[in-house]
Image (tube, rainbow, N blue to C red):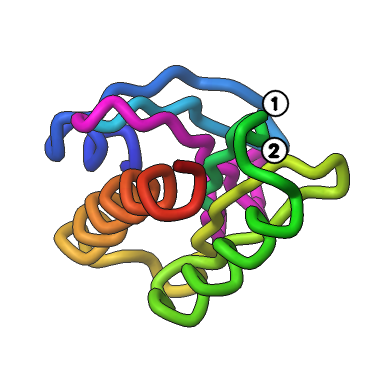
Amino acid sequence: TVESGLTAIGASSERRGTADRPALAVTFANNRKAAILFGSCEREGAVCKAISIQAGWTAPANVPADRLAANIQRFNQRYAFSRAFLTADGRPALQRYLTADYGFIRGNLAVNLLVFATQSERFAAEVLR
């Protein structure tokens, strides 16, 4: 279901993960990359109740760590759609978590995916540069 939604918005995907923990490697139409991880899955990954969309970057060498952290904080204050943070190893990342206990309306999922692609573009422009 998610794969057809990605195709509909001009994104491509490749299956990753396992039957119990399915995942997709995604390239959006704006060329931004992300991972979609499925959670709370039943029936060997056939029915999942959560989706986490995640993008990560290498910390830019030309941005000091304190400035990077401040940039991430400002991004989070400005945009509530997704959460920006530093991973345990210091890489900047962006995440959107969606619950799907009762499924998704196809158009709503498409909008969430499109907005995440736009947010990742903004994140790269506003936080990493």
How would you rate the neighbour count of disc 1 (Cα within 10 Å): few for under 14, some for 14-19, many for 20 or more?
few
Task: From the viewer's side, name the closer residue of 48 and 94.
Answer: 94
Residue at figure coordinates x 33%, y 52% from the top left: 122
Q: Is residue 17 above or below residue 102?
A: above
Q: Is residue 15 above or below residue 42?
A: above
Q: Where is residue 18, by image quadrant?
A: top right
Q: Let me know if residue 33 is in the magenta part.
A: yes
At label 1, the amino acid type is: Thr
Q: Is residue 80 above or below residue 28?
A: below
Q: Which mark is residue 101?
A: none
At label 2, the amino acid type is: Arg
Determine whether, in the image, residue 77 is placed left or right of residue 115.
Answer: right
How would you rate the neighbour count of disc 2 (Cα within 10 Å): few for under 14, some for 14-19, many for 20 or more?
some
Residue at figure coordinates x 30%, y 51% from the top left: 113
Query: Which quadrant of the rendered structure holds the N terminus?
Result: top left
Residue at figure coordinates x 64%, y 54% from the top left: 68
Say which residue label 1 marks: 18
CB of mark 1 within 8 Å of CB of mark 2? yes
Say which residue label 2 marks: 21
The rendered magenta stretch, by its main secondary structure, is classed as: strand
